Amino acid sequence: MVGPIRVVVTGAAGQIAYSLLHQIAKGDVFGHDQPLILHLLDIPPMMGVLNGVVMELNDCALPLINEMVATDNPEVAFKDVEAAFLVGAMPRKEGMERKDLLAANVKIFKAQGQALDKFAKKTVKVLVVGNPANTNALVCSKYAPSIPKENFSAMTRLDQNRAQAEVAAHLKVPVSCVNGVIIWGNHSSTQFPDVSHAKVILQSGKEASVYESIGDEKWLQTEFIEKIQKRGAEVIKARKLSSAMSAAKAAADHMHDIWHGTSNGRWVSMGVFSDGSYGTPEGVMFSFPVTIQNKEWKIVKGLPISTFAQSKLDITGKELIEERQEALAVCQD
Ligand code: NAI
């Protein structure tokens, strides 16, 4: 049996964490033979709720949990962690502008970057879920200079899962038959869900291009894109709460693939530091298709990009530059 690893989840008393912790603790992310020491961070007013989450995790009687550390102290929470799920953030309140939310949240991620820098393992893999996820990841990395910037990524896997599920429903195949849908850019309403390079195994058993199988460019360039871009808002409207079960599943998928890699030419989408590939702005956390080996990602290069796609990449890239400017201004205050 291998030794335990320390894994931190922030926002541990919140709704995404409530689903995510169970998936981590039963081995879906790091492996079914990997013991865990779970670090759970939330803010002081949430310690009572967090205590309830700890009780429930205990009551799950999960054999992989060696120990749990529930705390409101980032120093304790980030100490020696090898994987970090940064979920905790301030939710958008009524009447709050996007700018105000960004200002409040980047400050959290600045402080957590500084804490990771001081207390986490230098090999720690950091997944940022809390919104605005791409820019929070950028800020977090900036304030953790002793940790390689490649160790930080932002979650767009929920958008990828949503897009693959939508394509599968449209083509009437199980979602496991759809592969290679890409989410480009920001986890926001400017993201570009792109099926141009995706493949599907049709009911006949034949592999085909998703684009050709759907055969409706207008739908793909309008309704489909909007549906994925606005899916989060649709869920809020229906549930009166934001996506949590699906966000937790996506976070588990994302970290699972960092830990175990991608295979058979499969790629996944995640927000990573842009090297300027595909004409995107360098240095922002842009969602690209990546392959992963030995816990290191590589951007998939050389995919042909249509004029339509390029215009979409430009819009979302521009938004990320604006967010970066706003965030860095707030951090300097
Ligand atoms: P929630 O409000 O249920 O839970 C958030 C938790 O974070 C709360 O318990 C809160 O006390 C805690 N928190 C706030 N500040 C903290 C800090 N400084 N340190 C530690 N904990 C802190 O929210 P939920 O639904 O769990 O969502 C969390 C975040 O994930 C939100 O920012 C949401 O917008 C984002 N999200 C991102 C998605 C993505 O695809 N990237 C998808 C869905 C949600």
Image: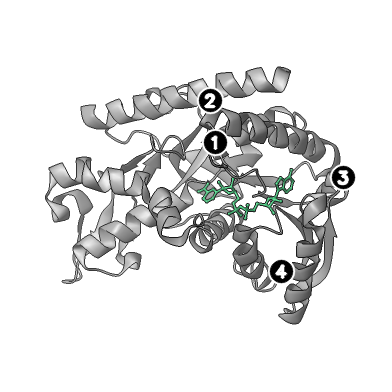
- Name the residue located 45 percent from the left edge and 54 percent from the top edge: 236
Q: Is mark 1 on a helix, strand or loop?
A: helix
Between the C-alphas of marks 4 and 2, the distance is 38 Å
**Residue type (three-letter) at the residue carrying disc 3:** Glu
Percent from the top left, x then y, of residue 246? 49, 61
- Name the residue located 73 percent from the left edge and 75 percent from the top edge: 56
Q: For residue 36, which quarter of the picture?
A: bottom right
Q: In this view, does 223 lie to the left or right of 48?
A: left
- Name the residue located 50 percent from the left edge and 29 percent from the top edge: 274
- Which mark, residue 34? 4
Q: What element carries label 2?
A: helix
Disc 4 or disc 3, which is closer to the eye?
A: 3
Between the C-alphas of marks 3 and 1, the distance is 24 Å
Percent from the top left, x then y, of residue 257? 54, 55
Q: Is mark 3 on a helix, strand or loop?
A: helix
Mark 2 = which residue?
Answer: 323
Between the C-alphas of marks 1 and 4, the distance is 29 Å
The verdict on label 1 being within 8 Å of ligand 1 is: no
Quadrant into which the C terminus falls = top right
Mark 1 = which residue?
Answer: 134
- Which mark, residue 75? 3
Q: In this view, does 114 lie above or below 34?
A: above
**Residue type (three-letter) at the residue carrying disc 4:** Gln
Answer with mark 4 or mark 3, whichever residue precedes in sequence. Answer: 4
Classify 10 Å Cα crowding around label 4: few (below 14), some (14-19), many (20 and above): some
Percent from the top left, x then y, of residue 269? 45, 46
**Residue type (three-letter) at the residue carrying disc 1:** Asn
Percent from the top left, x then y, of residue 222? 21, 41
